[in-house]
Each structure stands twice: as C-alpha cells, then as structure tokens.
Image (cartoon, rainbow, N blue to C red):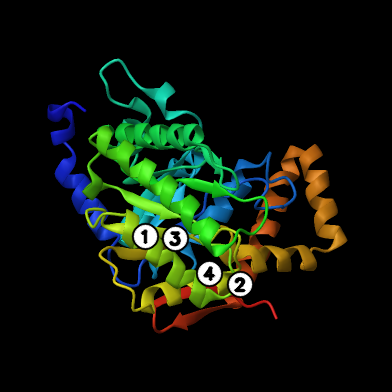
Amino acid sequence: MDDAVFGLYVDKLSNTAKLFKTPGKNIRAIDESISTVKLPCWEDNVDLRRAYRELLLTTPGALSSLIGVVLSEEALHQKTADGKPFTDVLKENEVLVGIMTRGNPVAWRGPDGHTQKFQQHREAGAHFAVWDDGPVIDASEPSETTIRKQAEELASFATYCQRGGLVPIVYPKLSFDKTPSTGKFADSTKSVLAACLKALNDRNVHLEGILLMLGIAPQADPRDIARDTLNVLRKTVPPAIPVIVFLSSGQSENEAVITMNNLKVSKVSKPWSLSSFFGPPPQQRTLKARARNSSPHSLQDTRRAQKRPRDLTRATFNLVRALASLLITRTTSTECVDLGFASLTSVTA
C-alpha cells in the first residue's frame, strides 16, 4: 500500500473503527433485497423501496441502539419525503453510514491505485463497507487452496476499502451442508481466520482500522455457542482488531439477542469489543404480519397499479401505511439488561 495514500486516512480509519466499541450500540442492515421483502411490486417500485427505508430510519426509537446502519447503493443516495438525505438522518442521530457493496472490488480499482467506487461512497457519506457477495468456503471439506483464495480476496477488499477511506468489515464466510460437530466448527474457523489474518498482514492492512465479522456457531445451546466461539477467537484474533461483529443470520430476533447476551457476559477474556450485525430477523415478524393482514382488495389494487402507473403512488402509500401501523403501534423495546442494548422487536401477537 502506498504510504502517502494510506496516511491520508489511517487516523480517521482508526477513530471510526473505535466508535463501534461504544457500549450498547450495534449495526443494522436495511439493504432490503427482493427476496427479503416479499411485497407486491417491490422490485419495480423505487418509491415503495424509498418509503419503506424511510420508515425504518425515522420510526421513533429505531436508531437509539445503533452505531451503524448499512445501506444499499440505491438507498445511500435516497432522501426522505421532505427532501432530507438518509445520510443526514443518520448523522443527526450519531449513526455511522455503511454501504453494502456487491460485485468484485478488484474490478473497481482506478489507475491511481485508489478504489474509485469506495471513494465515491465515502464522498456520498459512507464511513464503512460490507462485501455482500464475498467468497464463501464450504467448511465441511475446506481445502488449503480455497481457504487461501478467500483470504486473499478479503485482503484485497480491505485494502481497497481503506485506500478509499472506508473501514472494511471483513467477513470470512463459512457454509456447512449440515450442522458440524463442535470440534469441526472450531477447526474450520481457526484455519480460515488464521489464513485471513495472514493475508491482511501481508497486504499491510491497518488492523486497527477494520472490523472482523463472524457467523454464529450452529449449535443448540446458546451457552456452548458463546464459550466455544470465544475460545476459538482468543487463539486466532489479535488484540489489534478493535471490534468483532457477530452476524445474526439464520437466527430469529430473540435467538440473536440471547446469543449476543451470552457472548457479552461470558467470563472468557475478551481483548476486543463485541458487537452485533442485525440483518433481516428484526423485521420478519412485521413482514409476516403484513402478509397475514393483506386483504385481497389491497393486493388486487397493487397488481392493478403495476399495469396502471397512475395508481402506483396510491398503492405504494397504502402498503407503506400498513407497514407503518405495524411497526409504530405494535413495536416495543425489549431490554436485554446484561448486554446493555435495546432490541426493537415487532410484537405481532
């Protein structure tokens, strides 16, 4: 890495990464995809997507337990109905803006050695980045070649992020065909983390300016998950990395809160801060409730609106108003005292 280029951002990267150590604050993704939000005309209606994201960002109390919110590239440039950029809404609430990147970051590299795409995201208001479709390893039978390839690609992503002025969230993804034994999961995780950290060091990535993200061990007992996960991390992750982020993927909102609580209160020594990355789970009850409460008439109106553009705005408004009713009138703040953060959970019963 060019020292002169890197020097422009090194202090800022470190300071930004430290903000994720704030007690009781976590990361939330609202880069909703078509597969996540199964609503009529979601794919073809940018107004609906914008209104739904505005709802998630402006619902009272929705940002109180967050230090970072991850937006899609589309959402990064969107505004509220009264013209305020989403990035300004987050800034006013002291929430850092993240960008969910897709594609191959190596292909974005400009002739000057910077990653122009990341620079553009930074100029638009982003502070950190997550690679959505990064390399995944089949952890059931990982080979040294695939582990090394993943590590090198993640190190490239981190390098280009930092050159563009963004803090990278480095996520070495593991997939299992079936639930692995405790020993198998631990061995696979240690091998992948060791290779990833070596590649980061080889690339001279500024470790104090990254976040490391991991999935949760697929085990039944939350106490075993916390103990086994922390034991693996203590053997592989250096204290230079300020924060380890745990992904809630595959868990319900309640399971995610319980898991994070057990990780936080565990007596195993933790030289890094712990945080959590909540994706779709916190809104799944709301979306399911919306599906149950969708009357045939409202769905027919939406389908007709797809064929008649002049009715699209009305259909969009009705859908978002229904979602707003569910989120605002049926949402309570469920306190997790030991962990110290409030998980906004939609109560649909």
**Vertical side of 334 occupied by 242: above or below:** above
Q: In this view of the protein, can residue 55 be seen by the observer?
A: no
How far apart are labels 4 and 3 at the CA level?
Answer: 9 Å
Q: Which residue is mark 4?
A: 256
Residue drawn at x 50%, y 73% is 224
Find residue 284 and report its image quarter: bottom right
Q: From the image, state whether disc 2 or disc 4 is nearer to you.
A: 2
Q: For residue 337, which numbered disc appears in the image?
A: none
Between disc 4 and disc 1, whose residue precedes?
Answer: 1
Q: From the image, state whether disc 3 or disc 1 is nearer to you.
A: 1
**Vertical side of 92 occupied by 44: above or below:** above
Between disc 2 and disc 4, whose residue precedes?
Answer: 2
Between disc 2 and disc 1, whose residue precedes?
Answer: 2
Give percent across and percent down for residue 213.
41, 53
Q: Which residue is mark 2?
A: 220
Front residue of this view, candidates 268 and 62: 268
